[in-house]
Image (tube, rainbow, N blue to C red):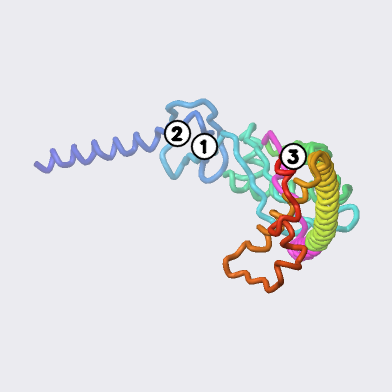
Amino acid sequence: MNRIGLIFSSFLVLIALASSTLFVVDQRQFGVVLALGKFKDVISEPGLNFKLPPPFQNVIYIDKRLLTLDSSDTEPMLTAEKQRVVIDWYVRWRISEPTEYIRNVGLNEGAGTIQLNRVVRNAFQEEVNKRTVKELLSLKREDLMADVKAEVLAKVRGAKPWGVDIVDVRITRVDYVEAITESVYRRMEAERKRVANELRSTGAAEGEKIRADADRQREVAIANAYRDAQKIKGEGDAEAARIYGEAFGKDPQFAQFYRSLEAYKTSFANKSDVMVLDPSSSEFFKVFRGGVAPAANNKK
């Protein structure tokens, strides 16, 4: 029984020892073999590989994919006109030569990130010092990013190459520092309020002008309409008088009789009307007394 346990234990030890000598490199990584803590070899091709068991050899992995470095420094930079601005940027980079990277930078991506952040920051500071804020916000921003990329490439490909490739450098934001931004916003707000007040004043003046012109046109229209109405009324009265004149001129006695009847009708319009006069001597009741007879009776 003890022999079986010993065999089984030995088998497990052999499996553990064999597994410690095998490692798999993924297609997204570089396999770095370290011998007693020192760099020995880089495995670039994916697959199963062999090494000595620990502590003689160990394996670490470095990412070979495209990496992104975002700016984390909020320190302002000075432009050509000594304006303090804050720039947000990012860099797309990858490890292209793992052997050079390990020897000159470090054993992981973090070491490259720290050093690359410093280099990119210094390159941006140098290029921003040559340009004005207007140029940073205009189409010349592309020239700035191209110049920064060129400076960073020159640094990482220098006497001690880093073994990295800089794919792209981009600016995501250019802004004044918070104190200046607040001052600019206050000035913009004051200017907008001034423009708004000016527009309101101009609008009120234009409104008064339009209302006054509308009132004037209304008065002119009413006056013209009244004038035309009076003119038409006068012409109508004249035409009516002419017609009456022509009609009554043919028989004056009938005309007088008709007008007297109209006068009586107007005078006695209400039942409560009372007139105190002498019918025998008043000219008003001359028709009743037979002083004026219709033309038809006269002819008879």
User: Would residue 296 be found to the left or right of residue 188 on screen?
Assistant: left
**Separation of residues labelled 1 and 3 (CA atoms):** 154 Å
Image quarter of the N terminus: top left
**Residue 51 tag number:** 2
Question: Is disc 1 placed on a helix, strand or loop?
Answer: strand
- Judging by the rendered image, the residue that carries numbered circle 3 is 299
Whether residue 173 is in magenta: the answer is yes
Characterize the local packing of mark 1: few (<14), some (14-19) or many (20 or more) Cα atoms within 10 angstroms: many
Identified by mark 3, the residue type is Lys
Q: Is residue 114 one of those drawn in magenta? A: no
Looking at the image, can residue 261 be seen?
A: yes
Indicate the amino acid at tag 1: Val
Spatial separation of the CA atoms under disc 2 and disc 1: 8 Å
x and y, in percent, of residue 114 in the image:
65, 50
In the image, 142 versus 41, the foreground residue is 142
Write the start and end of the magenta stretch as one range: 164-191
N-term mark: 2 or 3: 2
Look at 47% across and 31% down and name the residue there. 26
Residue beneath disc 1: 33
Sequence-first disc among 1 and 3: 1
Q: Is residue 89 left or right of residue 159?
A: left
> Callout 2, which amino acid?
Lys
Callout 3: helix, strand or loop? helix
Residue 27 relative to residue 213: left or right: left
2 or 1: tag closer to the N-terminus: 1
Q: Are marks 2 and 1 in contact (CB under 8 Å)?
A: yes
- Marks 2, 3: nearer the viewer: 3
Counting from the top left corner in percent of width and height, residue 53 is at 41, 39
